[in-house]
Amino acid sequence: MVNWHDIRDKAISFAHEYKDAKEEDKWAKSFWVRFFDVFGVRERSIGIFEERVKLLSGASGKIDFFAPGRFLIEHKTTGKSLLVGYF
């Protein structure tokens, strides 16, 4: 059963901990591991980091986190475009 009080407390702690995390290379993996932990989810139970994919441009690349049939995450450094290199 979900305990919303615990989730709220973890979310507040998470927000404070990562408020200044602006660089993808330094923070992406730990950010998402902690984000999933807010909800009591182990990232390995739903997906994987750095999944190789074929981009719309035809080149190959990696998606930061991929949960098959559910969602994908592409984490970027503050100010960096999500569109560059994908289309």
Image: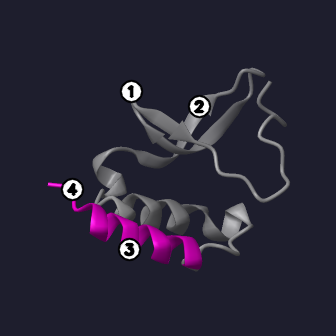
| N-terminal label among 2 and 1 | 2
Could you tell me which secondary element the residue under label 3 belongs to? helix
Q: Which residues are magenta?
A: 1-16
User: Who's the residue at 55% across and 71% down the image?
Assistant: 15
**Mark seen at residue 2:** 4
Mark 4 and mark 2 in contact (Cβ < 8 Å)? no
Of the 4 image quadrants, the one containing the N terminus is bottom left
Q: Is residue 3 magenta?
A: yes
Q: Is residue 75 magenta?
A: no
Mark 3 and 4 residues: CB-CB less than 8 Å, in contact? Answer: no
Q: Earlier in the sequence, mark 4 or mark 1?
A: 4
Question: How busy is the neighbourhood of tag 1: few (under 14 within 10 Å), some, or many (20 plus)?
Answer: few
- Res. 9 image quadrant: bottom left
Q: Whole-Å distance between the Cαs marked 1 and 3?
A: 29 Å
Separation (CA) of disc 2 from disc 4: 34 Å
The answer for how far apart the CA atoms under marks 2 and 3 are is: 36 Å
Q: Residue at x 62, y 68 (%)?
A: 27
Residue at x 84% of width, y 51% of height: 80
User: x and y percent of residue 52 in the render?
Assistant: 56, 37
| Position above or below: 69 against 27 | above
Query: Which residue is the site of mark 1?
Result: 69
Main secondary structure found in the magenta portion: helix
